[in-house]
Image (spheres, helix red, strand yellow):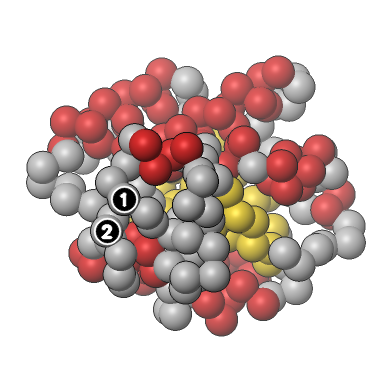
Amino acid sequence: MQKIENLKVYNKALIIVDMVNGFVERGVLHDKSIAKVIPRQIELIKEYQKEQELIIFIQDTHTKDSTEHKRFPDFHCLKNSGEEEVVNELKPFTTSNNAICIPKNSTSFMESVPFREVMKNSPNIKEFDIVGCCTDICVCNGSISLANYLDEHSRDSIIRVHKDAVATFNEEERQNYIDAAYLLMEQQGIQLVKKNLEFDINN
């Protein structure tokens, strides 16, 4: 994991959750339709590059001993399998001087020790934009956990989940879970937004 020397200079963070090969390109949990949100993600990444604000790529990364495999089918995103690597469309952006890649071994990026270190060392971040997959699992769990962390540390911040830049596998079959995830996030004060629309909970 590359390091950024001075995290205190950042006022905003774009968190790109699990846009890795194991969910988009191949593997037991992949769904190629997730790639439909990549163009919007690239737009947001370029905005952050222009503003020189922090970009965080979260990479689901497991070993065969990871207990998460008891709840989800078979092995996915194993370390050194290539499934844990950021998809090719986004990978060039991971080398930017304002970007960092962080592995996680659970469905919440907030539980990753490196992510907590970033949070600890970036006290001036007041806005968080979240995109990625899966909407009803890692995006939801991570966003709510982040909201709880910010509350615990009395950090008055805004969290936005971009509905046009998140997706999940088998979306038609999982719509009830997706709707529930949006309701839970909204309940926690997380803003649900789309391009050119400030709030968009119903669409």
Disc sitting over residue 4 in the figure: none
Distance (Cα) linking label 2 and label 1: 7 Å
Q: Amino acid at mark 1?
A: Asp
Dot 2 falls on a residue whose secondary structure is loop
Q: Amino acid at mark 2?
A: Val
Q: Are marks 2 and 1 in contact (CB under 8 Å)?
A: yes
Residue at 47% across / 37% down in the picture? 67
Disc sitting over residue 28 in the figure: 2
Give the tally of numbered discs. Answer: 2
Q: 170 or 16, which lies in front?
A: 170
Residue at 86% across / 49% down in the picture? 8
Q: Assess disc 1: are there few (<14), some (14-19) or many (≥20) residues with their C-alpha within 10 Å of its C-alpha.
A: few
Q: Which residue is labeled 1 in the image?
A: 74
Residue 158 found in image quarter: top right
Residue at 17% across / 39% down in the picture? 174
Dot 1 falls on a residue whose secondary structure is loop
> Quadrant location of the C terminus?
top left
Q: Is residue 158 visible?
A: no
Q: Is residue 133 visible?
A: yes
Residue at 81% across / 38% down in the picture? 120
